[in-house]
Image (tube, rainbow, N blue to C red):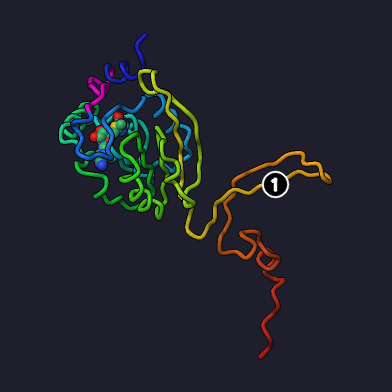
Amino acid sequence: MRRAHERFDRRSGILTSGNASRAELVSADSHRYAPTPVRFFRSILRKLDLDEENTTLIDLGSGKGRALILANERPFRAIIGVEFSPDLCPIARANLAATNCRGEIIWGSISDYEFPEGKLLVFFFNFAGPTILRPVLERLSHREATVIYLNAKHPELFDGRWTVLRRGDTFDEDGSVFMPYRVYRTIPEGWWHGTETLDFQIGPLNLGRWTFSRSVLRSHPARGRPTDAARHPSSLPSPAPG
Ligand SMILES: C[S@@+](CC[C@H](N)C(=O)[O-])C[C@H]1O[C@@H](n2cnc3c(N)ncnc32)[C@H](O)[C@@H]1O
């Protein structure tokens, strides 16, 4: 039986499978090309409840364009790939043309890339390590952005300005490497996100502990719990006459 990536390449009449050697890369913190697993990417896009018509999908390290071609199956506002390999960019452009994909390939390093206006869905698959990722995440954290992070080796880079929407594991396209993935979303300005712990205790007996994550308005006196005055504005004292 043909595997999903072989069927994808054959039906599209393109070649996105196969890895590139590390020697082709220009930065020590950058990773080599390996294509996005077809089933994983289709399924995660389906599961995310995004306003796709108003969202731009950006693949950071777009390789031969596979993720962009898969994203073209959905109604994203725009589809962009950023790729610094001079060998892979022309291959990706040819693949996009052959599949009538409306995506655009930008040749350059993600470190110099300026994200477009509006809502963003950004895909990272193994494209770089912390030195490159950290400043990219800092820029994104001020935006309305969702990040799909496949082969999530550095979850510590997503600090308190991000919340985890999904997490799990998936195989690479050969079914030989098991990779963790996470989906993060930025927390809007003014909100706090963190974990809280509840202990279930009867007298000296501890029955259990429940840790859960919570987002609340940071500016609020009770960390988001509305006060009586906020719930019932009519309960505020009336201004003094005259
Ligand atoms: C694992 S591949 C990603 C494959 C791709 N997303 C797909 O759909 O198949 C990682 C890619 O990131 C590119 N890359 C690595 N560092 C980069 C950087 N700093 N700027 C732009 N592209 C980079 C590599 O050349 C490689 O093609």
Residue ranking furthest to the bottom: 242
Residue positioned 20% across, 43% down in the render: 108
Residue positioned 29% across, 27% down in the render: 34
In the rendered image, which residue does mark 1 sit on?
198
- Compared across the picture, whether 186 is left or right of 90 comes to right
Residue ranking furthest to the right: 203
Residue 207 x, y percent position in the rendering: 77, 39
Residue positioned 35% across, 18% down in the render: 174
Residue ranking furthest to the front: 204
Magenta region, main secondary structure = loop
Residue 122 x, y percent position in the rendering: 36, 42
Whether residue 236 appears in this view of the structure is: yes
Residue 42 x, y percent position in the rendering: 40, 28
Question: How packed is label 1: few (under 14 Cα within 10 Å), some, or many (20 or more)?
Answer: few
From the viewer's perspective, is residue 208 above or below residue 22? Answer: below
Question: Is the C-beta of the residue carrying label 1 under 8 Å from the nearest atom of ligand 1?
Answer: no
Residue 151 part of the magenta-drawn span: no
Q: Nearer the viewer, residue 96 or 149?
A: 149
Magenta stretch: give its range.
Answer: 11-21
From the viewer's perspective, is residue 214 above or below residue 151? Answer: below
Residue 20 x, y percent position in the rendering: 23, 26
Q: Amino acid at mark 1?
A: Leu
Residue positioned 31% across, 20% down in the render: 8
Number of numbered discs: 1
Q: Quadrant of ligand 1?
A: top left
The quarter of the picture where the N terminus appears is: top left
Q: Quadrant of residue 242?
A: bottom right
Question: Please, what secondary structure does the residue beneath circle 1 have?
Answer: strand
- Compared across the picture, whether 209 is left or right of 1 comes to right
- Compared across the picture, whether 40 is left or right of 102 comes to right
Whether residue 102 appears in this view of the structure is: no
Q: Nearer the viewer, residue 54 or 187?
A: 187
